[in-house]
Image (cartoon, helix red, strand yellow):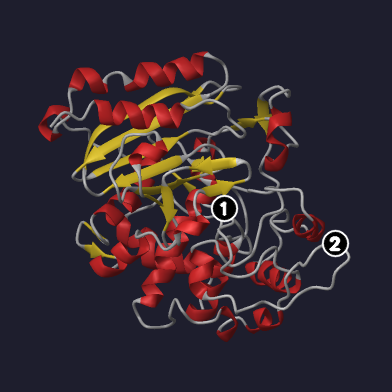
Amino acid sequence: MSATTVVAADSLGFDPRRLARIRPRMQQYVDSGNFAGITTLLARRGRVVHFEHAGVRDKSTQAPLDASTVFRIYSMTKPIVCAALMTLYEEARFHLFEPLAKYLPPFAKVKVWNGEGRPLADPLRPILIRDLFTHTAGLTYNFLEDTPVSAMYQEAGLSSRPSDTLEFIVAELARLPLAYQPGSRWHYSMSIDVLAHLIQVLSGRPLQDFLEERIFLPLGMAATGFSVPAHTRANVAAMYGRADIAFHTFTQALNKPLGPLDVAPTYPADNTSTWARGGSGLFSTASDYFRFAQMLLNRGQLDGARILSPAVAELMHTNHLPSNMLPLMIGILPFLGYGFGLGSRVLLSPAESCLPGSVGEFGWGGAANTYYWVDPKMEIVGVFMTQLMYNIEFPRQDFQVLAYQALVA
């Protein structure tokens, strides 16, 4: 795989001396011992002005971090799956306002948790397909909070067995109660896994095959998928973090030492075709993800490949939440200044976010501290890649600040 070409930064409005502040700052995080390696990529108007690496992909082997490094991107899978499903929306295969149960009938009988010792409640209205894109369907995760419904997810083993098919996982979600009434609040959840299965139902294709056809092949994302070929598996970055900690007990993680994590049992690089997810599961490189993000910045096309129409690309990255659902909260962490579109957060107020950026900027991150953002006004794409779970430092925020402070024209 060839390296992404880097052009002169000053030709695109960046001060090269200011841009040069990025790598030393990332190296400081590596030198602290908390990060094995960090990759940062910054582009404007489709041309890369910064693509650098600090540290290694694996501390045990000292294999260098470079353009060929493959990362587990966890929830950065979600925007890709949402974009893929919207290609079916463009074929009028479904409407956002339709009930999910029209296409996945088991959800017609779903109930809602109504408190300890009380019978389950009927939903006040059906789950709409848009609710799944916007995380307002009433679903949850098994690691965000310590609640009865999360415990049910944990007991059912959701997302913990690669042998489980998407069909099985979604059937379990329909069997278990919702944590909240549909449309009543924003709550980060397994809803994109349901959308991934909806892709399979509507298309009649395995998820990996559909993503290959609609996203990866047209965009030239050759290193992205739910598995890594044997001949490039050595390029997969090692994972680090604090073991056996759930997100809702994040503060307890601060007292546990950092070290290597074996995530292969739940996120296998050598998986079979059975293992595919919507909320996580993809492997990718910084260069590949840049191509996806640049397609979104270009309002649905890249290098002659049209993935989405401009109107639908804009619909995806418009805030769909009412003000009473803001601010966004994931566990105990607030996302101030942001709304949410169809699969990604959307910046509503740079002042509230406490970060530089433009109204309408959008993006998302992954559990291992991977992150991307797209700023349509400034025509910027940023991609941040590392492999660290339960981080308490702010390298990706530093990267974003350092990117904008270098933009001078």
Q: Seen in the image, is 90 located left or right of residue 45?
A: right
Which amino acid type corresponds to the residue marked 2 in the rendered image?
A: Glu
The front one of 100 and 329 is 329
Residue 367 location, x and y as percent? 57, 42
Residue 158 location, x and y as percent? 72, 59
Q: Seen in the image, is 33 located left or right of residue 259?
A: left
Q: Residue at x 62, y 33 (%)?
A: 390
Q: Residue at x 51, y 45 (%)?
A: 73
Disc number lying in front (2 or 1): 2
Q: Residue at x 26, y 69 (%)?
A: 311
Vertical placement of residue 33 versus 382, above or below: above
Q: Which residue is mark 1?
A: 281
Q: Residue at x 28, y 55 (%)?
A: 295
Instruction: Give the quadrant of residue 194.
Output: bottom right
Which is nearer the N-term, disc 2 or disc 1?
2
Label 1 sits on a secondary structure element that is loop
Q: Callout 1: few (<14), some (14-19), or many (20+) C-alpha neighbours within 10 Å?
A: many
Q: Seen in the image, is 126 located left or right of residue 117?
A: left
The Cα–Cα distance between marks 2 and 1, rounded to whole angstroms, is: 34 Å
Label 2 sits on a secondary structure element that is loop
Q: Which residue is mark 2?
A: 116
